[in-house]
């Protein structure tokens, strides 16, 4: 959510507005098929206070996807349920990775700001700078011999 208040009357693709007969027409399926998919947990629409099913645009898309996987690809309903679960898991992991990436970028920016503040606070008058003169002198160090 972006922090702004949403209009309660604004329709999104998650808004449950379609009764089962309309959802069946839009998805090209029989209402009994939609009930079966709900029982199997493939597509779970929202419920009204009277326990009537209300489908969203996203549910309709999912119904079409289930139908395509079943009819076109020949995948059984248990396989389709697993595919949907894995797709949902991937979407959740991608969202979490995006959150963590944003948090990491924020932490890196904060760290750079703090590092810059520390560097700016250094007192340069504490260590006087002395010019180093080039010389060709050679110093040889010999350790003292210990007396035997």
Image (cartoon, helix red, strand yellow):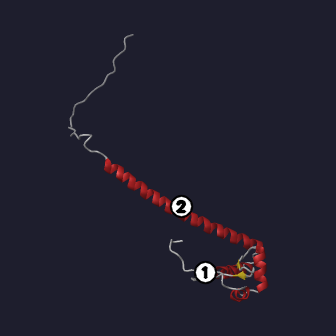
- Secondary structure state at the residue bearing disc 2: helix
**On the rendered structure, is 46 left or right of 128?**
right
- Secondary structure state at the residue bearing disc 1: loop
At horizontal 35% and vertical 16% (from top left) the residue drawn is 145
Whole-number angstrom distance, CA of label 2 to CA of label 1: 26 Å
Viewer-side residue, 119 vs 70? 119
At horizontal 51% and vertical 62% (from top left) the residue drawn is 101
- Residue 72 visible, this orientation: no
At horizontal 42% and vertical 56% (from top left) the residue drawn is 110
**On the rendered structure, is 142 left or right of 90?**
left
Q: Is residue 114 above or below residue 19?
A: above
Q: Is residue 81 above or below residue 24?
A: above
Viewer-side residue, 71 vs 78? 78
Front position among marks 2 and 1: 1
Q: Is residue 121 above or below residue 147?
A: below
Residue 74, quarter of picture: bottom right
Residue 49 location (% of width, % of height): 72, 79
Viewer-side residue, 135 vs 8? 8
At horizontal 57% and vertical 63% (from top left) the residue drawn is 96
- Residue 16 visible, this orientation: yes
Q: Which mark is residue 100?
A: 2
**On the rendered structure, is 8 left or right of 64?**
left
Residue that badge 1 annotates:
13
Q: Is residue 120 above or below residue 51?
A: above
């Amino acid at each position: 959510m972006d922090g702004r208040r949403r209009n309660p009357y604004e329709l999104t693709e998650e808004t449950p507005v379609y009764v089962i007969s309309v959802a069946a027409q839009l998805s090209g399926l029989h209402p009994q098929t939609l009930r079966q998919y709900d029982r199997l947990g493939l597509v779970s629409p929202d419920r009204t206070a009277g326990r009537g099913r209300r489908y969203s645009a996203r549910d309709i898309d999912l119904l079409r996807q289930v139908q395509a996987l079943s009819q076109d690809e020949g995948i059984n309903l248990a396989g389709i349920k697993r595919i949907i679960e894995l797709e949902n898991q991937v979407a959740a992991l991608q969202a979490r990775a995006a959150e963590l990436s944003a948090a990491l970028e924020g932490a890196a920016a904060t760290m750079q700001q703090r590092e810059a503040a520390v560097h700016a606070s250094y007192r340069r008058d504490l260590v006087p700078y002395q010019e180093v003169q080039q010389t060709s002198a050679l110093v040889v160090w010999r350790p003292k011999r210990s007396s035997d």
